Amino acid sequence: MLPEKNNTKILNAWASFDWANSAYNLAITVAIFPTYYDAVTKAAFGQKNNITSVNLLGIDWNTATLYSLVFTFSFLLTAILSPLLAGIADMGGKKKVLMRFFTYLGAAGCIGLTFFTGENIGWGLFCAFIANTGFSAGLVFYVSYLPEIATADKWDRVSAKGFSAGFLGSIVHLIICLYLILNAKSLGIDEGIASRFSFLLVGIWWLGFSQIAFFYLPAQKKKSTENTKKLLQLGFKELKKVYQNLQQLPQAKWFLFAFFFYSMGSQTIVLLAALFGSQTFKMGSSELIPVILMLQFLAIIGAYSFAILSEKIGNRNALLIKITFWGILAVLGYFIETKTHFYILSVGVGVVMGAMHLSRSTYAKLIPSEGNEENTSYFSFYDVTEKIAIMSGTFVYAMLTQFFSMQTAILALGLFFIVGFVCLLQVKNKKTENDCMIKIE
């Protein structure tokens, strides 16, 4: 039996998962951990020509490069696992089970970061890898609930609600962490210990608030009673079936191409912006965190603004506007020279960052509206596309940073927005019944 759609309690519970896991996304990937990582590795390994290096496997690595590569390989692992796990989720009714497993894995990684002090850089990178894998892998199961719990006309608004809940939750969490860091001395601790306590708080926050979603979100009906080995085989067949179905959905295929390229740019910029500010302008947590808080408020405004815009001009056109803004920001990032420039660009990033939810709701409109029990397999293709995009983006950024500069890396990301824009033009703003079962507008 399929769950009741547009049930307010279930929709709120779904959005609460964004509230829970966005504490990780903001504190670990954007705000506190990048600057903490930069500070403690500088203290542990020193700095030469404004570059902090550590010798691993006989190679002198820029610590910023290592940081980028950790996320690159985390997203690679997720891209490999997601299709396999999606098959198990669909065929074995394991969606909520796997969503819970990766939540606990990610939270454990955050708690492990509490013991990262700089000289044990291997441990810190390992915990960051585990935390990001848990976060990114869990999202595929979370997003795939959207078509099951809401009707098509509600997807943009519900998706925006989830993003906004995430931004708001991460703001509340970050304010608590900011208080600890700014008042560390009066609390009898140093800023480093306050930062590490923040990582512990992320894990506890993530674990605790995710229980709301786990309690209210519906469990899937099993389509097979086979063991895990058999489920893997059935999962491969299910994914093959979905892949073949996607070949008959040219609009969805073009969207995935566009999504791949513009995600390479936007996700990489968001992921590494704080490290850029820390290494380029020597900005500490006390300077970066207020800026990042501002970004979250702007992102809430952006999320609802783009949801309303998409209702008026269609998802595709709204996404084209979003991509154009990202491209302009990437070009301007190459010429950034002062903290003031960094602050100005951050305002633009904050607004356009809120439009990220449009991608998942647009894709939901481009896949068949029937057969809800197979949504996880469809969304696994979306998730794999995103993870390979981020992996590619962070790898390009890491290599260009290693051999050139961060500004050069940001400018290169602008090229991906151009390709994404061209691909998205192939998606019709109004769809025919042969292309898709729902209109994208």
Image (cartoon, helix red, strand yellow):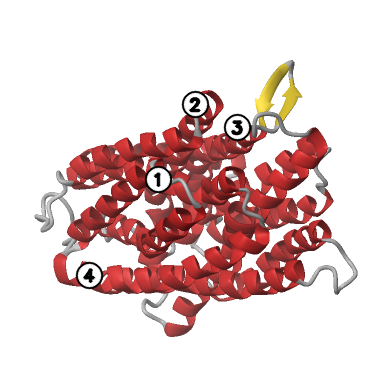
Cα–Cα span, label 2 and label 3: 12 Å
Observer-nearest of 232 and 338: 338
| Neighbours of disc 2 within 10 Å: few (<14), some (14-19), many (20+) | few
Q: Is 304 rendered above or below residue 429?
A: below
**Residue type pointed to by label 2:** Phe
**Residue type pointed to by label 1:** Gly
Circle 3 is placed at which residue position?
65
Q: Earlier in the sequence, mark 4 or mark 1?
A: 4
Which mark lies nearer to you, 2 or 3?
2
Cα–Cα span, label 3 and label 1: 19 Å
Q: Is 176 rendered above or below residue 68?
A: below
Cα–Cα span, label 4 and label 1: 26 Å
CB within 8 Å, label 3 to label 1:
no
CB within 8 Å, label 4 to label 3:
no
The percent position of residue 39, horizontal first and vertical second, equals 73, 47
Q: Secondary structure at mark 1?
A: helix
The percent position of residue 201, horizontal first and vertical second, equals 74, 66
Observer-nearest of 216 and 30: 30
**Residue type pointed to by label 4:** Leu
Which mark lies nearer to you, 4 or 1?
1
**Residue type pointed to by label 3:** Thr
Cα–Cα span, label 2 and label 1: 15 Å
Q: Earlier in the sequence, mark 2 or mark 3?
A: 3
Residue 136 visible from this viewpoint: yes
In the picture as drawn, the residue positioned furthest to the top comes out as: 58
Which mark lies nearer to you, 3 or 1?
1
Quadrant position of the C terminus in the picture: bottom left
CB within 8 Å, label 2 to label 1:
no
Quadrant position of the N terminus in the picture: bottom left
Circle 4 is placed at which residue position?
309
